[in-house]
Amino acid sequence: MKIGFIGLGNMGNPMAANLAKAGHDVSGFDMADVTVPGVTMASSGPEAATDADIVVTMLPNGQILRAVANEIIPAMAPEAVWIDCSTVDVDSARAVAEQAKEADVLAVDAPVSGGIGGAAAGTLTFMAGGSDAAFEKASPLFDIMGQKAVHCGESGAGQAAKICNNMILGVTMIATCEAFALADKLGLDRQKMFDVVSTSSGYSWTMNAYCPAPGVGPASPADNDYQPGFAAELMLKDLRLSQQAAESSDADTPMGQVATALYEKFVESEDGLGKDFSAMLPRFEKRTRG
Ligand code: NAD
């Protein structure tokens, strides 16, 4: 298959390399001067998209996605498939899908979970939104770049699933970190806290699989001086998207709102920038009530 791949950063680069390794003819474009093993570099987005059976985009945000859509949709052949794997706001995902539909291009919004490690290993999870026909045509690529793809519904449903999941993740991480900080003050040993909570009703992915306390539970960024992993600023981006969606759909998300405000403070006026999102634990350790 002929594939165009636009946005070859931390995630897009290894994803495109995996498609080329699987034997596809991949033409790539990025604003930055990058190279990808096995990928032929094009001089523009439209050049990468022309004659492609499938175009994949992996871009920073919805504004850039809308600009790239204006360029590549006119260059794409009717019935070609466009898979957007970027994490963006639901409104942008729906707007570009509508634009694609008018040009007979089959659009799928398919944000991912799994991070840079999952992108390199080809073990991402895709959350997809779009028609059955579009999802079916995109599936062979999901199989190469990932281990699981869930068809969540029509256009925008993939982004909706992603931001809802990450809102739970942000809120749960904060709850786990503040509980550890409280346990410290109460003189409760962290290992005992883990042993109880990880097998009791307070268990969660953030406690059981990605424990924010160093030396406790399975290996996690906490054991590596909070090097990301999943950076606090990326969590902030996703929480902001959740709050933007809550506002535009009139949903009441008070916990998501508090989590967004806390990560905002952590990243912008404390020392969270560049650290894993689980570094909220040392943040709570340093602070007292009020
Ligand atoms: P990144 O900044 O490393 O890569 C984005 C790339 O897009 C850059 O190389 C940039 O030069 C390129 N770009 C920007 N504007 C462009 C344009 N107009 N045309 C062509 N290329 C352009 O970001 P990333 O970490 O690869 O993340 C990409 C997306 O994946 C984001 O939406 C992010 O939220 C999401 N995501 C990231 C992770 C992660 O762990 N990094 C995990 C899940 C989802």
Image (cartoon, rainbow, N blue to C red):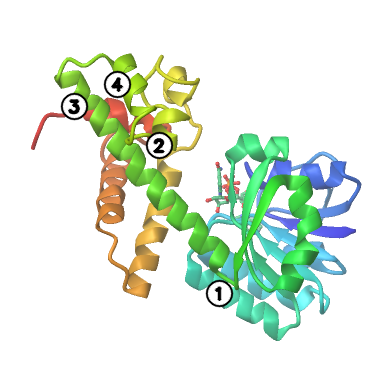
* 179 or 93, nearer to the observer: 179
* Residue under pointer 2: 204
* 254 or 30, nearer to the observer: 254
* Residue under pointer 1: 94
Seen in the image, is 36 located left or right of residue 31?
Answer: right
In this rendering, is residue 196 above or below 57?
above
| Mark 3 or 4, closer to the camera | 4
Say what amino acid the circle numbered 3 marks.
Answer: Leu
Name which residue lies at 69% across and 85% down.
102
- CA separation in Å, label 2 and label 4: 13 Å
* Residue under pointer 3: 182
Q: Residues within 10 Å of mark 1 (few under 14, many from 20)?
A: many
Decide: marks 3, 2 in contact (CB < 8 A)? no
Is residue 285 visible in the rendered image? The answer is no
Say what amino acid the circle numbered 4 marks.
Answer: Met
* Residue under pointer 4: 193
- CA separation in Å, label 3 and label 2: 18 Å
Q: Indicate which disc, 3 or 4, sits on the residue closer to the N terminus.
A: 3
Seen in the image, is 226 located left or right of residue 144?
Answer: left
- CA separation in Å, label 1 and label 2: 32 Å
Say what amino acid the circle numbered 1 marks.
Answer: Arg
Q: Indicate which disc, 3 or 2, sits on the residue closer to the N terminus.
A: 3
Q: For residue 183, what is the image quadrant?
A: top left
**In what element is the residue under mark 2?**
loop
Q: For residue 42, what is the image quadrant?
A: bottom right
**In what element is the residue under mark 4?**
helix
User: Does any atom of ligand 1 lie closer than 8 Å to the CB of label 4?
Assistant: no
